Image: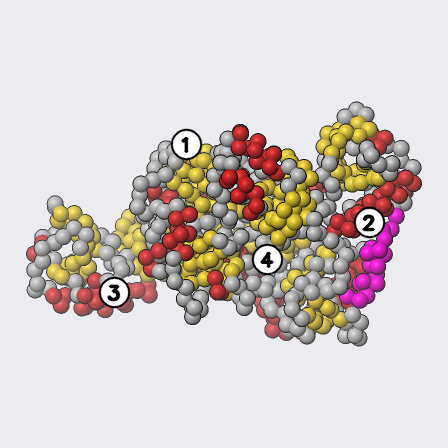
Amino acid sequence: ISYDNFDTVHIMAGENGEYYVQLEHNIMRLVQMCKTLGKHASIKVEPKLGELYVKSFSDTWCRAKVINNCPLTVFYIDYGNSEEVDKKDLHPVPEEHKRFPGMALKIKLAEGTSDSYLNMDFSDTLSVKAVEKLTDGTFIVHVKGEKYEMSNHCESAYPAGVYSDKERNAKHVLGLVKENDTGVWINVQKVMSSECITGSLSLQTKSADYVSMLDISELLRKIEPSRNFKPEVGDLVTVRAGTTWCRGYVMLLTEEEVSVALIDYGKTISVKEKNITPLPPRYHTYPVRQAVRIILKTYLETNAGMIGNEIHLTNVKKFNNYLKCTFGDYGEAEIIAWRPLIEEAGLRVFPLNNNSLVFLTSFHTPRSVYLQPAKKTEATKLGELLQDMTLYATKADPLKRKPLCGELLCVKYHEDGHFYRGQVFKKADEDTYKVNFVDYGNTEIVSVNDMKLLPDTYKKVPCFAVKVGLKDVVAHNFNPQAMSYINKLTLSEKTLLLMYEDSLSEVTLSEQDGKILNTHLVELMESSLKTLEMPTTDHIKKFHPFTGEDVIYESWPPNSRIHLVVLAVQDFRTVLALDQKSNLLNHLFTYLTPKITKYCGESKQTGYNPRPNEVILAKYKEEDEAEINWYRAICIKAMRSSSYVLFIDYGNCGELSHSDIRSMPSEFMDSPAALKRCSIYGLIDSLSNDMKDKAKHMLEHFTGEATVIEDNENGNSTLWIPSLYSKLQAIGFPRVDPPPGI
């Protein structure tokens, strides 16, 4: 039964909202099969439990499976009913029909379906769409035309996600968990929102269906690669993801990479085609799938340290298709089988070719400019999509839950009141989120009340806005003059010529008169690259304070390698660190610090009393140096005549008199901070206090290569540090394996 579209089904058996049904397109196949099933009616058999036979029911020959020997009882696998029978009425099944799976599907109408559907008769029809599949194979379905309220129940609170047709019947590890089970852990792989994370469920069990993640990787490692394999969407595959081998299925194909849903990890990754091979049939349903989605009842205060952490589940209560439990120290949670949303595979975009015509629709930084193709065909498709979205939005209910980070939704744009496709990427406040409108590239803060679920049909349409970077424009941000110029281009909807050689991260744009956009921007921004305009002391009169949430941080692309320098250790897995190879450091040391120092020396301010979390300018002097400099800092704790501050570009901290603090002008907020808060993957909560102390000591003054697992806009990153783990393992730490893709 489709998760995307409504299917017509015929009632075969059942009552009270639980039915066995036939898909309409299978009815003729069933009729043809019944005509041939009576060929061996004269042959007698000795029935065996679990075996399939032919039996006449209401003058129709049917396939019947023995489900009980005493009394002899059969289940009609193509109809869903059962009855007691005499063995003389059973006959062998023709070989061509023995291997064909039963065509009766069991459905259960979702909570909220009208009572009029609870007692349907044989051959009545319904139009239904699956929203969940229980561990016994039952489909929870919505009936077309019915309105369903989104509730806290796991079957309807989150989208069912995308299945590969080839793995729909695979067993899941949730089916092996027992009531009050004490041997259940989850290794966190991804934080999707403050209330939803994904990961792998591991289990202490004697079941032969369960295999540990490490052993699964070793089993898959032995599979012989298929050099000529050309993957298609939905194919079950083996993936070499870094040093780990994983099971998954193909979700998205591009010219360069293949997006694969990892069915034991609860995440999607993009890999080169050479790194995947067909999954042998013996591993299609064995071992059980282990990926889960965790829905927290108490929101996470921070996601720092979550990825790679191993959480023990207690107070485990088992239901048909999910668990309720206490999730470590994070409170109550529900655990359901993970199925990826379409957007978790990455959003497709319409291609932009070299020497193509484009419109500039939005801009943020020189590394983040959005273009739309100027072709008439794409413009027509966009117009049709917006028409469909408008019609859908008039009928759809508002979202009844918190959105997931990365989720694609139907979102209202307040400037014109219309609904567009928007991808949530950051929580702004309790009920507001930062959203990127994927067909234009602009970003807005939007209330949950202005969001609606987006049907998969609209998610599958490629995004019309394509993100590019401007070649040779190396500044971190646009200055006011550059912003004014590029804003006029955006509003004018001028057609621009796009040129690039290797990558859309290095493009050149030119106007129709031949004027090169990149060159003109460099000229306008020359002052930003070589110097900084000095703020005037008049800013104090129209002063507006900045907080830690206003700080821009340097971006570390996932899977990139950095040379990590730890400047401060906060706990056994959290450090304040920077990338020693970053080009930003020269800008901070050579230009920003001297300008801040000069500004503070000329300022008429004699002191400032900051509030906690406020960004400020603060004086610092090394004991053995005569030179005094001023730097950017954030107030950690405010007191009567002094404040405890953290220098956000260097990591050191200390108590300063308010006479050594100044308010922050906006001009010094434009440069990103190089210092980031980093969580070290694999250092888990369950480590002993002694091991935590050893890890903390080893992280002090650490320098070395690290790989970025995840990087967030708020300055938090998760890192994999290979040289650290070997040292920790040598002193008794448990083995830590890298996450897939590293």
Residue 315, disc: 1
Q: What stretch is highlighted in magenta?
A: 518-534
Label 2 is placed on what type of residue? Thr
Position of residue 46 measured from the top left corner of the image (x, y, whole percent): 9, 55
> Which comes before the other along the chain, label 3 or label 1?
3
- The kind of secondary structure element at disc 4 is strand
Residue 637 picture quarter: top right
In the picture of the structure, the residue carrying the numbered disc 4 is 421
Image position of 693 with respect to 397: above or below: above
> Which comes before the other along the chain, label 4 or label 3?
3
Rounded to the nearest angstrom, the CA distance separating label 3 from label 2 is 79 Å
Label 4 is placed on what type of residue? Arg
Residue 30, disc: 3
Label 3 is placed on what type of residue? Leu
Give 349 or 10, whichever is nearer the viewer. 349
Rounded to the nearest angstrom, the CA distance separating label 1 from label 4 is 40 Å
> Which comes before the other along the chain, label 3 or label 2?
3
Image position of 496 with respect to 251: above or below: below
* Residue at the spot 78% in from the left edge and 48% down from the top edge: 588
Position of residue 192 measured from the top left corner of the image (x, y, whole percent): 54, 47
Between disc 2 and disc 1, the foreground one is: 2
> Which comes before the other along the chain, label 2 or label 1?
1
Image position of 522 with respect to 424: above or below: below
In the picture of the structure, the residue carrying the numbered disc 2 is 590
> Which comes before the other along the chain, label 2 or label 4?
4
Pointer 2 and pointer 1: residues touching (CB < 8 Å)?
no
Label 1 is placed on what type of residue? Asn
Crowding near pointer 1: few (<14 within 10 Å), some, many (20+)?
some
Rounded to the nearest angstrom, the CA distance separating label 4 from label 3 is 42 Å
